[in-house]
Image: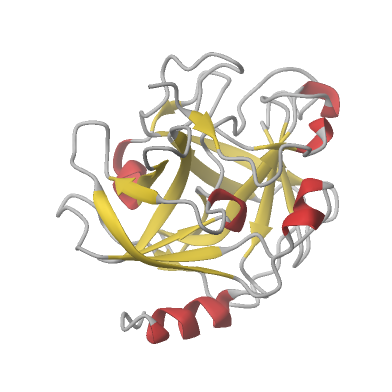
Amino acid sequence: MIIRVLIALAALAAFYAPASALVGGARNAGAVGNHIVMIVGARGNNGTLCTGTALSRDLVLTAAHCVAPQARYQVMASNATPFTPLAAIALHPRYDAQSYARGRVTADVALIKLALPLPANIIPAALAAGGNAVAPGDRFVIAGFGLIAPGNDAGSGIARAATLIAIGQPGNLQIRLVDPDTRGARAGLGACTGDSGGPAFRETRGALAVIGVVSWSTGPAEGEGCGGMTGITPLTLYRAWIVQQAAKFGSPL
């Protein structure tokens, strides 16, 4: 089965390609990979793939554009594990699929309630505390199951991670990350097809906490593709909703 990134609307501008897998020689995720799962489109949904972060044994955080309304999905801890069925999906109420499709900032955040607990090897990740300011040069770890080269499905489904740095003017609506060596000017580390919805971790007091989700990517020099810039939707404005929705699902964080 061909695994492809889920695109909310097919007309998404090429400048902001939905982010999928880690390219540029990203390393296997190691322990970081124990926090993430694959979100796979069920039969009849074209075998689409995104990444999500376990927040508890039955809650997964991902990008809203990864879970289109009225489509069916399943969660996998890895290629070698059985599917975990979903019980419910909640998209942030301020998420606008049309805005996302036009490359505009929106609340690209969703929470998935699972019908069964995740396997024991999946370790829930902590949400970063609110109010964490981000400055250019700050380092983040992203992780995902996506492609290792644009347009090539080989290597998808394996958890990989990379350390990127913030550039520009990071804020509460969007954070732009690049490979610290290439700075997005030439091909380097970055999200690609299949990495959408994956975590952006920040280290706090020696531990990693989720500060955002992967929303989009570009190729080098802000061209089409992967390996240039990785766009993160920070959780600062949406953390309270995540906590409230988790409680509504009966799985308080």
User: Taking 192 as reference, is 93 above or below it?
Assistant: below
Image location of residue 179, percent across then percent down: 66, 31
Residue 124 in the image, given as x and y percentages of width and height = 31, 62
- Look at 42% across and 51% down and name the residue there: 72
Q: In the shown orientation, is residue 247 left or right of residue 68?
A: left
The residue that appears at 52% across and 53% down in the rendered structure is: 67
Q: Is residue 147 above or below residue 253?
A: above
Quadrant of image for the N terminus: top left
Q: Relative to residue 137, is residue 27 depicted above or below?
A: above
Q: Is residue 224 above or below residue 209?
A: above
Q: Quadrant of residue 91?
A: bottom right
Left or right of 144? Residue 163 is: right
Q: Where's residue 204, x and y in %?
A: 48, 63
Which residue sits at x=81%, y=56%?
99
At 37% from the left edge and 35% from the top edge, which residue is drawn?
Answer: 29
Of 18 and 43, the residue lying toward us: 43
- Count the marks: 0
The answer to which quarter of the image holds residue 228 is: top right
Residue 139, position as x, y percentages in the image: 61, 47
